[in-house]
Amino acid sequence: MGKTLAEKILAIKSKRSDIKADDFVMAEVDLVLGNDITAPVAIKEFRRLAKNVFDKDKIVLVCDHFTPNKDIQAAEQVKFIREFAREYNLTHFYDVGDMGIEHCLIPEKGLALPGDLIIGADSHTCTYGALGAFSTGVGSTDMAAAMALGKAWFRVPHTIRFNFSGDSLKPFVTGKDLILYTIGQIGVDGARYKAMEFGGAIIDNLSIESRLTMANMAIEAGAKAGLFAADKKTVAYLQRAGKSAEEIYPDKNASYYKVYDFDASSIEPQVAFPHLPENARSVSEAKGIKIDQVVLGSCTNGRIEDLRQAAEILKGKKVHQDVRMIVIPGTQRIYLQAIEEGLMQVFIEAGAAVSTPTCGPCLGGHMGILASHEVALSTTNRNFVGRMGHPQSAVYLTGPYVAAASAIKGEITHPKEVL
């Protein structure tokens, strides 16, 4: 029997050819990731386990959640990480001025490659499945053990296959809409401890940025990983990052736990209502909902393609007087590229505030906290109770096109209504 992408990668990394779903394996990891919230706990545990890291080139520490530091506690956290990175001469430590939102930064740097096995003490580590890697979030203690040993244990997940057919997507529909629609169909636990494998004609034509968005939100369906075949488009993307890569595909006779077939050409722009990502509906069903804040950015939609899409809608227009719009590029390089392309001028002239790269408001950290009874429309990945501030606030999730159009109207709206 052939192997799914998840089985294929875990078989190689555990040096076993006979693995199947539900087997337990010990596998060698290619990258271990931590951030300014999760890494300090891992470092403390690491010091109890070992005196040396397994490979200074394969540990990545990114300061992004409360960076630039929002308070004394955040500053102490980052100082603790910074001193550890210097002590062990870690190659990949990213601080203010050289950092970015971790799941935007790592693909940009070419640190995630097809066939890699990556673990990170952050749930959205599943993002790198867009590049054909098996990547998943773990706890800080698992991160500590991996920093010492270069290995981690896994239960091989069953795989659910999602086929997206159709001639083309409707206007303003992106990977964000496809993944919100998918979660809406299966629920936030519909892929619990499963690998989500995405394919079909629509996926073949989807940009790498949209694939990264979809893989990023696999965790919102409870998945262990979200995987795409690494095709010619993937190889070309990584070449721009200065890395060579090989294509990787699931076997044609792979066995799947379940298969979903979606006609993607019929999917409308999506909005996920509070307080779960599974509450996805077409934008027409959300029309007229008043909003106080719009957030464009995060590890889900902070890439250059996302900024271009929003700027396309905002150019020559103004953000509604009752709306605060916050734009957060995913990395310093994306920020600079947006300046060079004139996107930042579009945002600022429209009345949006532009931030340095940070997770910021996505987790209710800083740079855009909501007060009671305020409503945000956000391109981030979660809309749980109190996720972006006061527990009596509300968050709706959507893609860049709808976010920008709604910022102009002051209420959730279809982009075609402002063009």
Image: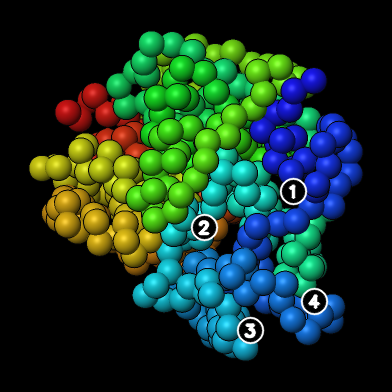
Mark 2 highlights which residue?
Answer: 111
Q: Secondary structure at mark 4?
A: helix
Q: Secondary structure at mark 1?
A: helix
Mark 3 highlights which residue?
Answer: 88
The amino acid at mark 4 is Glu
Residue in the image at 62% along x and 37% along y: 226
Q: Secondary structure at mark 3?
A: loop
Nearer-N-terminus badge (1/2): 1
Whether the residues at callouts 1 and 2 have beta carbons within 8 Å, the answer is no
Q: Nearer the viewer, mark 1 or mark 3?
A: 1
Q: Residue 141's x, y, as percent?
A: 79, 67
Q: Nearer the viewer, mark 1 or mark 2?
A: 1
Mark 4 highlights which residue?
Answer: 45
Mark 1 highlights which residue?
Answer: 13
**Quadrant of the rendered image containing residue 104:** bottom left
Residue in the image at 48% along x and 41% along y: 212
The amino acid at mark 2 is Leu
Mark 4 nearby-residue class (10 Å; few <14, some 14–19, many ≥20):
some
